[in-house]
Amino acid sequence: MRFAGPTPDSIRIERLGVLTACYHRPSGRTHLLTEPAPEILTLIAGRTLSRSDILGELTRQYDLAEEDGVMEEALAARLDELVEAGLAVTVREDEVGTDA
Amino acid sequence: MHEFHRQIGPVRFRLLSDWKAPLDRLARLYAAYPEPEHCDFTVRLDAPNPWRRFIRPHIRLGGDYAVAEAAPLPLRHALLAAEMAMNLHVALGWRRHLVIHASSAEKEGRVLIMTGQSGSGKSTLAAMLGTRGWRFMGDEFALVDPAIGHIHPFPRLVSLKNEAIGVMEAIAPTERFGPRLTDTPKGDIRHFVPPVESIAAMERSAPPALILYPRFGFAPDVRPLGMEENFVRLTQASTNYVALGETGFGALTRLVRAAPALALDFDDGEAGLAMVEQLWTEEAGQ
């Protein structure tokens, strides 16, 4: 299972204090995100990545320390939230690289 | 059908009424406002059925926009009906600005916005500021220019309610007041004409400098709001944020970055006004 983010031109991100306001152009909806959701969204914007790819890049970019699967579990929860919010979609492995 | 045209801020209204008397009263109170030839909205004050024009006359609010479940108001509350109908049209139909349910006043070229629920004191505070050297800009809607972020005035008649009526009666001349309406859905209401200087300047916008969330009837207190809380509360206070799409999003993010926000509790009009002045000095910047 992989995760695809919105194309960069379909989303507008504005940082407001501790939260990030995100306007999703296709749906017209406004989302308020707290870290690491904006960071994940930036990472997957216009890309299709697996959960392990995403965790690897976040670990490298933000010098994260893995603690017995805690980070992986937290990432899974945030990705589920982004999918539920309509800001990310899941892509089956056999669909990767095919046109929609 | 009787007809009446007036411009309030950038909004041009055409009111049509089954009765002449309400429009005559409006004409007296809105005497200083421009009378446009072409209008943005048509507002209708109709009888809900033919006999209600004469027998226990009632007004159905309508026009370009209507709310089907809104109960008709008795003819003796015609001024309130006209106010509610015009508000409805701005709230539902205005697209040139981000519309926020708020009062506003300008001092030294910068704008104070006060937003809150009905009874919060925002109208009374704005009206009082208008008598203390501030330019009154409006008590119902603050119009945010999406292109440059300025606040445009909407200086309609101030709708004073209950205790606020006495507060303003004590400091303003009688000829600036409309009749006292009793037993309305909001209690007693008396409309108050803004200063002529405010009406004359109603096409002059200015940048925002401070946003307050007043609450009347609580022990004096001040609490800062973060940008994120301010953003969420203003989306709720806006009547057209969703309808404006990304334009509204951009206007609102710009607004919360441009002006700090504070929650203000007060239990006395003069004390509240003093707190507003102090906060303006401390927070609005130079």
Image (cartoon, rainbow, N blue to C red):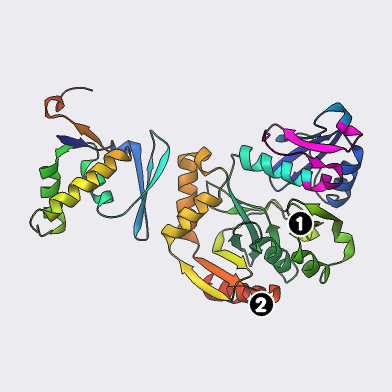
Task: Name the residue nearer the viewer: B134 or B225.
Answer: B225
Task: Name the residue nearer the viewer: B131 or B192.
Answer: B192
Instruction: Give the amino acid type for the residue marked by disc 2 in the picture.
Output: Ala
Residue B284 vertical placement versus A75 (above, below)? below
Q: In which chain is the residue bearing label 1?
A: B
Q: In which chain is the residue bearing label 2?
A: B
Q: Secondary structure at mark 2?
A: helix
* Residue B60 covered by magenta stretch: yes
| Mark 2–mark 1 CB contact (< 8 Å) | no
Instruction: Give the amino acid type for the residue marked by disc 1 in the picture.
Output: Gly
Q: Position of residue A80 (x, y in %)?
A: 24, 42
Of mark 2 and mark 1, the one earlier in the sequence is 1
Label 1: few (<14), some (14–19) or many (≥20) C-alpha neighbours in 10 Å: few
Q: Secondary structure at mark 1?
A: strand
Check disc 1 and report the residue beneath it.
B187
Quarter the N terminus of chain A occupies: top left
Q: Is residue B39 visible?
A: no
Q: Residue at x 18, y 49 (%)?
A: A75
Mark in the foreground, 2 or 1: 1
| Residue B93, image quadrant | top right
Q: Residue at x 33, y 40 (%)?
A: A85
Q: Position of residue B129 (x, y in %)?
A: 70, 68
Q: Which residues are magenta?
A: B52-80
Q: Residue at x 39, y 36 (%)?
A: A25
Please tell me the numbered disc located at residue B271. 2
From the viewer's perspective, tell me whether residue B128 is left or right of residue A36.
right
Q: Position of residue B212 (x, y in %)?
A: 56, 65
* Residue A47 covered by magenta stretch: no
